Image: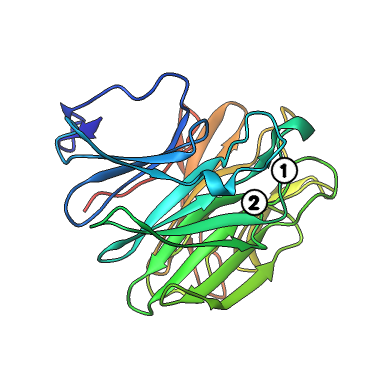
Amino acid sequence: AKIKNSIGEIETSRSLPALSNPQAAVTDLQGQIWVSFLELNEIYVYSKDLKNLVAQVDLSSFALKGTAGNHSDLGPMALVDEDTILVAAQRLHRDRAWAPDKQAGLAFINTNTYKVESTHLTESSNPVYIGVDSLKSRTLVVGKGDLSHSSGNRGQFLFFNNNDLVSASLNFVSGKIIAADFATGAEFPALIVWYPQENKSCVQLGNSPLVCDGNPENGGYVFSAIRHVGNIIFVAYYGNQTSELWMITNGETVSIQKVPMDLPIFSLSFGP
């Protein structure tokens, strides 16, 4: 559905393929809407008004052969320049409790021709977020790693410049990344990292923790959603079936303003 204004009025909507499990949507400069699915190995491209299916882009080459269903497990997307969409494939081993493969897939697709320009396998495991810094021509891919309580794959974030994966720099964190965001001009991404062995989660910039707290008794993650805007990190704090919205200043001293809310917050976004 396309939301028309700040009061949440629906401008237009359409149904998606049954049992397709849509994961992400992004709009290109022509207004076309690109949608990825966990259960389909194609990206669907819809017209601006959502009335027409304009194209289907096949990314089945990322599928893990021999696993249940041979799925690519397509996930986050981003418009990385004026005519290129970047798509990440999580490549989950569904026959092994959905454990992520150690190599994720990345595909660059031309928004004018709908052609796949290049595909790559990277060491970024279980990608959950793609961020773009247009000022520095940098792209960030954040991988959760394996979220099981076992050691599993660590969380990581991958930087590269100008859509050139040869320049990629892979950074690991010692915990599991729950959520991420990347502000324009920032040196490092803002992360929520869960440390299962210490039973705590932290809000941090790259590998530098800003504030940490223990896991609540009900097993939920303390910090559940994050946005990075300028030098402010907005983060949702979850506990006792309620949430608070925190604002954390990126300085030597962490200042926190708590705004109590009655319901859990699992997503944060900002309008234009």
Q: Check the picture and name the quadrant holding the C terminus.
A: bottom left
Element class at badge 2: loop
Q: Where residue 133 appears, x then y in whole percent?
A: 38, 71
Q: In this view, does 64 lie above or below 187?
A: above
- Residue 235 in view here: no
- 238 to the left or right of 200: left
Residue type marked 2:
Lys
Closest to the observer: 268 or 143?
143
Left or right side of 85 for 182? right
Figure coloring: rainbow
Q: Residue at (50%, 66%) from the top-left corner?
A: 140
Residues tagged 1 and 2 counted as in contact (Cβ below 8 A): yes
Q: Which of 259 and 70 is in front in this view?
A: 70
Report the side of 61 relative to 79 (left or right).
right
Binning the other alpha carbons within 10 Å of mark 1 as few (below 14), some (14 to 19) or many (20 upward) gives many
User: What residue is rendered at 47% in x and 20% in y?
Assistant: 19
Q: Mark 2 points at which residue?
A: 144
Horizontal and vertical percent for residue 141? 53, 61
